[in-house]
Image: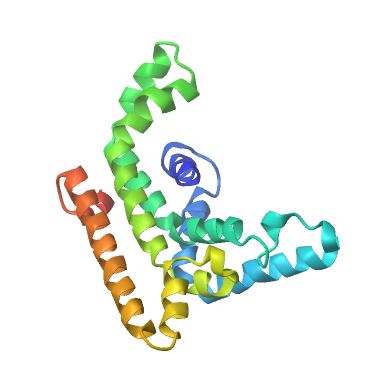
Amino acid sequence: MIVGVCAAIVIVRSNVPGRNLIDALSMLPLAVPGLVLAFGYLAISISMKHYFGESTPAWLDVQKYPAFLLIVAYAARRLPYVVRSAVAGLQQTPKDLELAGANLGASRFIVLLRITIPLLFAKLIAGGLLAFAFAMLEVSDSLILAQRTDYYPITKAILDISQRLGDGMYVAAALGVWAMALLTLTILSANAFLGKKLGAVFRI
């Protein structure tokens, strides 16, 4: 959320050279296959372990503690949803309100905290819910990076359980239905929060 809001402010509210490039880069995770990104994170972890040896920080070792890289992977893959919702919100928000706050002596941080963020709140919540819903059922990153049973996300757990003899397929199917129900509930919650269709978040 923080990275997405910062990127949106640079894209919409600044005159920084290359802001269009930042906009394109923020959308790049949608174009790059998840398996490519996952293997990239895995290569980073292996390289760090090879370089540092036993002194490698646990949070950089996928085999010991994959949670950190999983969070980074999920955040990077779903960043475009937050950026697009924040950009749409900024484009629909009059800049005069921010200028008025700055004219009354408020710093940029106070303007952001007291004016910009409250005006974008509904858009950010909707974008965050959408990012969470799709990250929850992310497949490629989970299959590659989650290498310990204790840290299996939902999708990797479903795959592991489906290979269990006996009732494995039935339990995996039940988990799949539960995951789809949770995804549906999340999207409906975003719609109810906005009071309109979720697709309207991305309209200018």
Residue depicted at 47% across the width and 79% down the height: 160
Q: Residue furthest top?
A: 104
Position of residue 180 measured from the top left corner of the image (x, y, whole percent): 27, 68
Tag count: 0
Q: Would residue 169 be seen by someone viewing this image from the given angle?
A: yes
Q: In the image, 63: left or right of 196?
A: right
Residue depicted at 35% across the width and 25% down the height: 115
Position of residue 178 measured from the top left corner of the image (x, y, whole percent): 28, 67
Viewer-proximal residue among 126 and 138: 138
| Quadrant housing residue 157 | bottom left
Q: Would residue 200 be seen by someone viewing this image from the given angle?
A: no
| Quadrant housing residue 72 | bottom right
Q: In the image, 145: left or right of 1?
A: right
Residue depicted at 20% across the width and 44% down the height: 194
| Quadrant housing residue 147 | bottom right
Q: Is residue 124 above or below residue 167?
A: above
- State how the image is colored: rainbow
Q: Is residue 82 above or below residue 9?
A: below
Quadrant location of the N terminus?
top left
Position of residue 112 measured from the top left corner of the image (x, y, whole percent): 43, 28
